[in-house]
Amino acid sequence: MADSRDEPLVLGIETSCDETGVGVVRGTTLLADAVASSVDEHARFGGVVPEVASRAHLEAMVPTIQRALKDAGVSAKDLDGIAVTAGPGLAGALLVGVSAAKAYAYALGKPLYGVNHLASHICVDQLEHGSLPEPTMALLVSGGHSSLLLSTDITSDVRPLGSTIDDAAGEAFDKIARVLNLGFPGGPVIDRYAREGDPEAIAFPRGLTGPRDAAYDFSFSGLKTSVARWIEAKRAAGEDVPVRDVAASFQEAVVDVLTRKAVRACKDEGVEHLMIGGGVAANTRLRALAQERCEKAGIRLRVPRPKLCTDNGAMVAALGAEMVARNRAASDLGLSADSSLPVTEPHVPGAHAHAHDHDHVHEVSKDNLYS
Ligand code: KG4
Ligand code: ZN
């Protein structure tokens, strides 16, 4: 077996949303995962405020890089590359990470790898379960995205099969939590309440599951409205809202659709491995139902631990290390942040020429988070 020291040592920087993440990996081994979050600063707004996030990244950037290097027990001069999320995400937030990565790459004389946030969410699973099988189906569900992606090579070929046409899955959790006065972010608290509720108490609608609907797209806004109306009607009648049953029934509607479509995509495409990533992958019911349905369908399920599912720098480092291992071209110092970088571009080699058509890629932008 090759000495693991032969594997690339890469530092990854992630600032696409409200987490300042810096990770260090050697190949598929996680060495450090430092995260500074500004989530508390956004809580009173019920969503991420881009300007607040950018300022927080700026303050956290250097200390978080230093902490990651210290945690990893490595020196910056030993790095084989510096990877950074080039997009998609909040433009101002991305810019802080890209600028920092360029400055470090230039000062240290190291290759720079601008990588795709969504591809990083998939690649992170290598740190938990070893090399990604090819092909792998990925269900990415977070506050900013809900996509089904087919990856045959995480450094060069990631194909979007479907995505949400309105709210992201995590956004739906956050909005329903707000209606129930449970605070922000809503996912973890709904998950907790749902454990004591009846998922069949209320039959909420399953979006886009009709025979003529797009097989792999998602829609959560109808569900959200339906849950909000149901709660309003209870309140108007002067009745108590059964929070646990509402949480469980709402959550069931979301994870039923997510898992059904993911398994269907695997079957249709003949793919035997499904990975689930993004903040919503922390959901206990999603994990359980996915496991159950995958087992029935003969699909192997890979879900990284929750800390690797939410935005972090280790996932960026993991993809950067893969770029180095597969000899992908480094980015040049003209690298720019691209808030709607399409998932079909796992990395941004050379000067980024903005050749793609932005009209096709709104589903992966996080610009609509602040609503
Ligand atoms: O990946 P992430 O940290 O950031 C984004 O890229 O958005 O995901 C955050 C989202 C939030 O919407 C949050 O409510 C949701 O993930 N989330 C969950 C759970 N934990 C976090 N949703 C459902 N169940 C959970 N246990
Ligand atoms: Zn994310």
Image (tube, helix red, strand yellow):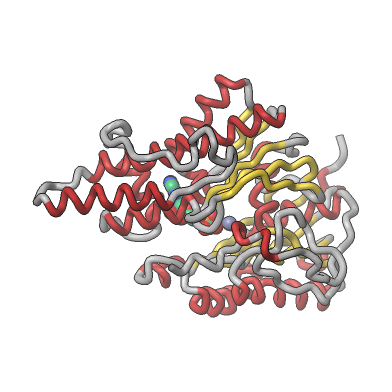
Q: Residue at x 59, y 78 (%)?
A: 58
**Going by the image, does 265 lie left or right of 3?**
left
Query: In the image, is residue 61 above or below residue 180?
Result: below
**Going by the image, does 352 lie left or right of 294?**
right
Q: Quadrant of the C terminus?
A: bottom left
The percent coordinates of residue 26 (x first, y second) are: 76, 51
Q: How many marks?
A: 0
Q: Residue at x 51, y 39 (%)?
A: 258
Residue 246 or residue 306, whichever sits in front: 246
- Give the image quadrant in which the ligand numbered 2 is located: bottom right
Residue 4 or residue 329, whichever sits in front: 329
**Going by the image, does 69 lie left or right of 6?**
left
The percent coordinates of residue 203 (x first, y second) are: 31, 35
The percent coordinates of residue 81 (x first, y second) are: 81, 62
- The part of the image, by quadrant, that contains residue 60 is bottom right
**Going by the image, does 153 lie left or right of 71?**
right
Instruction: Report if residue 288 is visible in the image.
Output: yes
Residue 159 or residue 47, whichever sits in front: 159
Q: Quadrant of the N terminus?
A: top right
Residue 245 or residue 362, whichever sits in front: 362
Instruction: Report if residue 309 is visible in the image.
Output: no
The percent coordinates of residue 173 (x first, y second) are: 40, 51
Query: In the image, is residue 142 above or below residue 128?
Result: below
Q: Residue at x 56, y 22 (%)?
A: 295
- The part of the image, by quadrant, that contains residue 346 is bottom right
Q: Residue at x 59, y 31 (%)?
A: 263
Taking the view exactly as shown, the residue that stands out farthest to the left is 238
Query: In the image, is residue 62 above or below residue 184?
Result: below
